[in-house]
Image: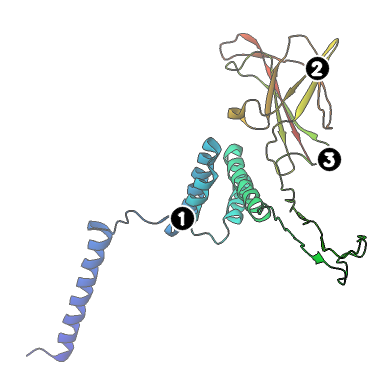
Amino acid sequence: MRSPRGWHLGVLLALLAGLGLGLVYSWVISPLRVLDAEPNTLRADFKDQYRSVIAAAYAATGNLPRARARLSLLGDSNVVEALNGQAQRMQANQQTFERADQVAALALALTEDESSESLASPTIDTAVQVENIVTATSSPPFTDVPLDLTETPQSIETQTIVIESTPRPTNTSTSQPGKPFALTGQEPVCDANLPNGLLQIMVLNSNRRQIAGVEIEITWEGGEEQFFTGLKPELGNGYADYIMTPDTTYSIQLTRGSDVALGITAPTCQSASGETILGGIKLTFQQP
């Protein structure tokens, strides 16, 4: 006859063996596979990737309602704050500036859309109609309107007072007046795949968002010319370029007020094959 102690030990070993076999089966042989999971159950880093893809789609299509619907699947308590926080993390981690700018641009678009919805209420037409029949014994409704008291009734014409609500201005991606732009970057570009003498200019606001529609003035001895950012949106809203002539010195500034980039000439570069080519210059203006 087995002792109670031996019986208890056998039961314990059997339980441990069953537990071990169950863990091996569930973790190694047939692990749980989650299919068609909701976006709000994703890990934090996967949610960041999801927002980046939505921001890239919005930058390509401009469909804000669809972007808003997709972001709602993440279940963020504040969608705009989540996007702004991700954009700051992307810049701090030195990720691609274009992707961080897309996320920040989507956050700004949502903010402006919410502001416009709350402020652009339908025009309020308050019609106050006064139809008072004045008799010889009645008092005039307006003290400053003279009335002739006669035996026959007179009527005051209906007056309509229209009060229109004026929407408040909302934030745009344009620069603020009174804050000149600073020249924050100037570097030569030697790339055989780019046109010879290509001058590239990037204009950013204080939040490092690209600004379209900024006029740029370029001058040289005996001539000057103006061009604008945003004419090539596929390269960025704040991007503009100009083809420089060899052996010509240029001065570049923004007409809204900025530092002046002096002594700009197309540099001479050497390609990978040893051939001498005409390089370019990249300038960056940013609002402080």
In screen coordinates, is 157 left or right of 236? right
In screen coordinates, is 90 left or right of 70? right
Residue carrying label 2: 250
Q: Position of residue 273 (x, y in %)?
A: 56, 11
Q: Position of residue 141 (x, y in %)?
A: 85, 66
Residue carrying label 3: 179
Residue carrying label 1: 73
The residue positioned 30% from the left and 56% from the top of the image is: 33
Amino acid type assigned to the residue bearing label 1 in the image:
Leu
Would you call the spot at circle 3 few (<14 residues within 10 Å), some (14-19), or many (20 or more)?
Answer: some
Q: Earlier in the sequence, mark 2 or mark 3?
A: 3
Q: Position of residue 49 (x, y in %)?
A: 49, 47
Residue 77 vs 67, above or below: the answer is below
Labels 1 & 2 near each other (Cβ < 8 A): no
Residue 226 vs 53, above or below: the answer is above
Q: CA distance from mark 2 to mark 3?
A: 24 Å
SS under mark 2: strand
